[in-house]
Amino acid sequence: MPDLGERPDLAPDPVVQAEVFQQLDVAANPSGADVGIAARAVREAQSKRAATPARASTERVVFNRRPIGVALPVGHERLITLPSPAVLHVPGDIEVAVRLESIGRTVYARALRPFAPLRIIAELIETGEQVPLDLVANEGTVTASEELEVFLGERVLADRKSEPTVSTEHQDQEQQQAADMVQLTRHAARALYAPKRLAYGTAGVSQVKLDTTPVNGLIRGALVETTPIGQWRSGNLWVTAVVVRNLAKSPLEIPLEALRGQWLAATAQHGRIGPAGSERDTTAIYLVCQRPFESCR
């Protein structure tokens, strides 16, 4: 048998070997020269496979007020799962470096080219907690896991519990400064879509807790997924932001007239969304009621 010059650390991988022999068409009746050529090809294929870094499935980090580093492999999408749905505050020119999409608790991030660290802020809608994320993409980020899951640390939760409660006097002042339906809807839209410098508060408007479980059948006859992600109150009015994602293969005009529930007003961020899987298959609607969302739908 000819000496193939094998190294112990590169013992033939049966899968790679079969692939190479099949490509060289020497498996059936190999000659000594053919076997030598095939053996070298096997070792080269194994070396290339060994040089390709493996990516772990999930990385888990705990947020305790320090910024979280997020490594992005160029050209590959990475999922960032937050403790709850969030609004992203990003630099105005971020689109040239990274594509970001936020749906529910998940941020989909894809680096378009290598870039130095840049910071975005994820503001949790339920609590107002702000989580700084430092995104970076370079040669050292190619092994980043496919998903990054963020948890709130004990220190952050303790700080939240220690926040002073709102006094009765302050509640009375907010009642006097109650926003109307238009102001309340604009506040919800700013919270979801506006850059941080424009996402200012509105007098008399406060955020309230909300069950963010997807709701079936909220829009009659439409093949969509509807997920409430934020709720605010002012006086006797509540507004709920609901993410609408198209599940059909054709574009959709948002049929607000087909909404189920007792809504005083309904507004769509975009009147038309693209087919499922496109970059524009998702939008938000804002529903105003005189009671919380669960009691109005």
Image (tube, rainbow, N blue to C red):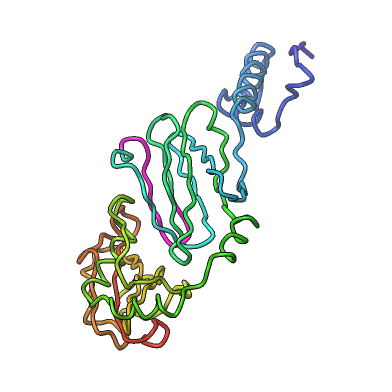
Residue 227 appears in view: no
Residue 138 appears at what percent x and percent y? Answer: 48, 28
- Write down the quadrant of residue 293 in the picture: bottom left
Closest to the observer: 85 or 157? 157
Q: Which quadrant of the view contains residue 46?
A: top right
Residue 32 vs residue 84, the one in the foreground: 84
Residue placed furthest toward the front: 169
The range drawn in magenta is 96-107
Residue at left offset 33%, top offset 68%: 244
x, y percent for residue 39: 67, 18
- Where does the N terminus fall, quadrant-wise? top right
Kindly identify the residue that appears in the image at 62 percent across and 50 percent down. 62
Residue 183 in picture, x, y percent from top left? 23, 71
Horizontal side of 218 relative to 271 (left or right) equals right
Q: Could you tell whether 289 is left or right of 159 in the image? A: left
Q: Of residues 192 and 23, which is closer to you in this image?
A: 192
